[in-house]
Amino acid sequence: MGEPPSLVEADGPARAAAAVPEGLRARLGGDPLTQAFATRRSSHWFARRPLPVDDPAATWEALLCVPRTGKTVAYIHVPFCDNHCLFCGFYRNPAKGRFSGPYVSALVREMEREADRPAVRSAPIAAVYVGGGTPTALEAADLHRLITTARTHLPLTPDCEITIEGRVHGFDAERVSACLEAGANRFSIGIQTFDTTLRQRLGRKADRAAAERVLADLRDRDRAAVICDLIYGLPGQTPETWRADLRTVVDLDLDGVDLYALTMIPDSPLALSIDKGALPPALALDEQARLYAAGLETLEAAGWRHLSQAHWARTPRERNLYNQAVKERAPCLAYGSGAGGLLAGHRYVLDGDEVSYRQRIASGEKPLAMMFAPADDLPGQAALSASLETGRILPGRLEALVGAGFAAMLAPVLEHWAEAGLITPRPGGFALTRAGWFWQANLIVGLQEMLVLFHNGPPEPSSPTRQEHPRHARHRHHPAG
């Protein structure tokens, strides 16, 4: 085990800060909601520079022979959209021509081919998420066929959460009925904003009235949880338009809502439009923080439950099983062009070229694009992420999962974050404050870095005779799961 960072004797808040690695230090003084850190860090798995495996096809075949353990989910990707919305980084293919039937046929073959393999059949699947892209751009008959195939060939639990992601435009009554009749029990509709002017600027075709009508119709069917996404930080968004969006969600009596920060993707249509002056700049980080806090206040006042950093529920129907499991690094079986999964600790991504994907499926091949070796101490990372997703840091539980001495190593970091107003003491540990919820990704990354220090110790200085490339350093073991 690595030794904790050396402590520097000092007084008050400075003593705690001096014991914390520089990259984990928050600003002391000022408003923690808007000033705790200079930037929001990414806790995405790819930011940790995973190691690719040497032979993805052979590794995949071996993984299929190993029974699964633990809670598992499945992800099915539909990479087609009617148009490329400016904010979106997931656009792949236009939903034009006869794309629906051939693509779903390939998905069906992919699921059928692996259905009896131990890695698929051996344990229940708690949630299935059909995402995109725009799954609701598929024809009604193909939506029904896709969901039915998943229910037939995947070992779903009796109460499996089956989510269909969609958008307002084109999600007609026939498609809704096809999803419900096939067994979908959760709809996640990408609204982003109800404000008609903002929607049109972003490339959304439906206006406020149409968006409200689709959500109300889904709600009134009373056969599935109805969730919508809102984005804060959009160019031209104001506190007034944001609060109006929040009030609309509350007034519609939806089952849940997701509040996501705008992700500015370099060279995206949105970034290019801002650079050209066609749109105003996206909101600054401090403005985003205030909008997130307004979301917390509004939903809390309306009696909604805070399930995780970005997810709230009004009714017990909204369980958020898939999203929570993914954050906890649960195994995820992936199907479809561009889909990403996790099996026995191995991250993998399928061919993002839809035509190539279908051709490879037709030839009997698993259309892998990338596969990465398991991360060091994946169970520890999962425990850290799962803890923060519930808004709690429980040092004793983390130590039981990671190893003796970890709680003592975390103590100065947690003391510093408490001084900074990001966490507050609770029985058994700490809870995130309002500011801590906004900066949650920074705290997750910080705890993950402490985990690396705990196992490996501080980084060794570079040697003139032996210098490892950072992608290949410090991979001592690769635990599965």
Image: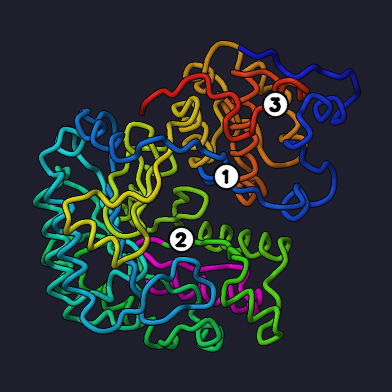
Mark 2 against mark 1, which lies toward the viewer?
1
**Which residue occupies the foreground of this view, 265 or 172?**
265
Q: Position of residue 375 (x, y in %)?
A: 48, 31
Residue 47 got which mark? 1
Q: Is residue 59 left or right of residue 20?
A: left
Q: Is residue 8 magenta?
A: no
**Label 3 vs label 2: CA separation?**
44 Å
Sooner in the amino-acid sequence: mark 2 or mark 1: 1
Which residue lies at the image location 16% right of the left edge and 51% below the top edge?
A: 364
Q: Which amino acid is tagged 1? A: Ala
SS under mark 1: helix
Residue 254 visible in this rendered orientation of the protein: no
Q: Is residue 10 above or below residue 288?
A: above
**Label 2 vs label 1: CA separation?**
23 Å
Q: Which amino acid is tagged 2? A: Asp
What range of the chain is rendered magenta?
227-256
Sooner in the amino-acid sequence: mark 1 or mark 3: 1
Residue position for label 2: 258
Q: Quadrant of the N terminus?
A: top right
**Which residue occupies the foreground of this view, 467 or 25?**
467
**Label 1 vs label 3: CA separation?**
21 Å
Which residue lies at the image location 53% right of the left edge and 46% below the top edge?
A: 44
Residue 170 visible in this rendered orientation of the protein: yes
Sooner in the amino-acid sequence: mark 3 or mark 2: 2
Q: Which amino acid is tagged 3? A: Gln
